[in-house]
Amino acid sequence: MSRIKVLLFVFIILTFIASVFIFVFSGNNFLIRKWNITLDPPGFFDARQMAMASESYAKGYDPLVQNSQYKGGNRLNYPRIWHLLFALGINQSHTNLIGVITVLIFFIGLGLFWFSNKIDDLTCSILSVAFLSSSVMLGVERGN
């Protein structure tokens, strides 16, 4: 394993931990604003949409046609294959758990990528910068 990969991995993880720490404890969302990510409280909005759709489905509505739980009246914008999750009986109280699991799986995949022997140091360096881009951080914040 190359030293550069280890350093990049440590840098990304520390940056993410510092971002979460500042986000949770400071209240001013400094780093999220620096990445130009608009916050949509209460967080993990994409995961929350699936939970709202599951609640609508449990009430007898088709979320692709009418999502009764979504306050804005928007319909679910995911393919029908996602309806398989409704069998789990998820609701909005499960949103944070789903979001945290999604983020953890993302970082586990990121760690597996970094410590793979199939990529060289230059590729790892370039992709490490890409992982800190605003689009990737938006996906993390939305729980997508």
Image (tube, helix red, strand yellow):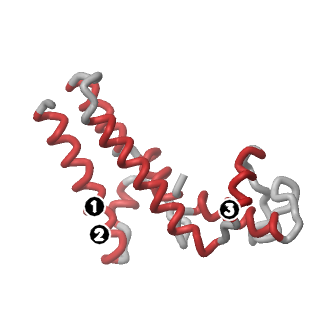
Q: Which mark is residue 17?
A: 1
Q: Position of residue 87 (x, y in %)?
A: 73, 59
Secondary structure category for the residue under label 2: helix
Of label 1 and label 3, which has the lower sequence position? 1
Nearer the observer: mark 1 or 3; the answer is 3
Q: Residues within 10 Å of mark 2 (few under 14, many from 20)?
A: few
Q: Which residue is mark 3?
A: 88
Q: 51 left or right of 134?
A: right
> 2 or 124: nearer the eye?
2
Secondary structure category for the residue under label 1: helix
Mark 3 belongs to which amino acid? Leu
Of label 2 and label 3, which has the lower sequence position? 2
- 125 lies above or below 94: above
Quadrant of res 121:
top left
Cα separation between marks 1 and 3:
31 Å
- 112 lies above or below 58: above
Check whether the beta carbons of the residues at disc 2 and disc 1 lie within 8 A of each other.
yes
Mark 2 belongs to which amino acid? Phe
Q: Which residue is mark 2?
A: 21
